[in-house]
Image (cartoon, rainbow, N blue to C red):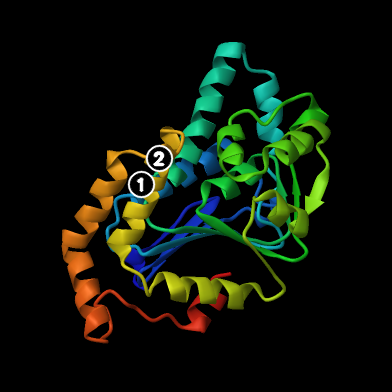
Amino acid sequence: MSQSDQTVLSFTNLEKDGRIAHLTLNRPEQANAFSAQMMDEITRHATALSTMTDIRTVIISGAGKHFSAGADLAWMKQAADLTYEQNIEDAIKLRKMFESIVAIDAPKIAVIRGAVYGGAVGLVACCDFAIADENSKFCLSEAKLGLLPAVIAPYLMRKMNPGQLRRMALTSRAFGVNDAKQFGLIEIVTSELDDAVYDEVKSLLGCGPEAQKAINRLFESLRAKSFSQCDETVQAIAKARTGREGQEGLRSFFSKSTAPWVRSVKHADIQEKL
């Protein structure tokens, strides 16, 4: 990997390995807890990723034993001393970070080990789907501190069962991967994380990248319309069928040839980054 393909900052790593981007939370000694600097870095990385047309998949993970323990204690202590107006500004930065992740049209996978607490649960919910090690633990811990999962609530409500989400927020109970899957927060539970990620990335690289980006844009647009049927859906399929990628895909299908966008990935390339 060339130097131009790797940017290393204090608390996050962003690496481009071919068409796969790895965004790694990199404060393992603090269980990858969010700080103001980490939030700024994630936002910058995600904003850059949203403009990279060659990126096919974004993998978001945590260095070390944990995905993220949520808010950094020093940052929380500082927030307690801020005025109401300053806390508004601080929360807006957090919202911008989550929105920058959602705005990435390329498929986004959260890859989870260990603890996923507080705001980190929201980061998982911002991804298109999540793969978790069978020993991972989750917790919306805010209410134990007299707080609430406010900024992350819209992302959680897009994925999680409403009744269970409210229960977890009200009780701040920790829950395991099987519950997280049942609640809708994660999609895959595995004891072989590398293998599961490899299988999903391999499938993603076999599909049309423009179609995948259009799917994410369409789903977000329909969500804003409360998933009502509208002209946008018929326009989207008509555009896809008559567009370059759709035409190439149909020709490849009928001629039984490989579509031009299909890419391979080595298992080792996934394993060494997780």
- In this picture, residue 90 sits left or right of residue 147: left
Residue 167 % position (x, y): 78, 36
Instruction: State left or right for residue 78 relative to residue 125.
Output: right
Q: In which quarter of the image is residue 209?
A: bottom left
Q: Residue at the spot x=72%, y=74% of the render?
A: 191
Relative height, residue 212 to residue 156 (above, below): below
Residue 219 in the image: x percent, y percent?
A: 41, 46
**Label 1, residues with CA under 10 Å away: few <14, some 14-19, many ≥20:** some
The residue drawn where x is 72% and y is 54% is 182
- Image quarter of residue 56: bottom left
- Tag 2: Cα neighbours inside 10 Å, few (<14), some, or many (≥20)? some
Does the rendering let one see residue 272?
A: no
Quadrant housing the N terminus: bottom left
- Nearer to us in this view, 169 or 69: 169
Using the image, tell me which numbered label, if any, was put on residue 222. Answer: 2
| Amino acid of disc 1 | Leu
Residue placed most toward the observer, 175 or 253: 253
Please give the residue where the numbered disc 1 appears in the rendered image: 218
Return the mark for residue 54.
none
- Check contact, mark 1 vs mark 2: CB within 8 A: yes
> Across the whole image, how many numbered discs are drawn on residues?
2
The residue shown at (34%, 49%) is 48
Residue 93, image x and y in percent?
50, 30
Q: Residue at x 64, y 72 (%)?
A: 193
* Quadrant of the rendering where the C terminus is positioned: bottom right
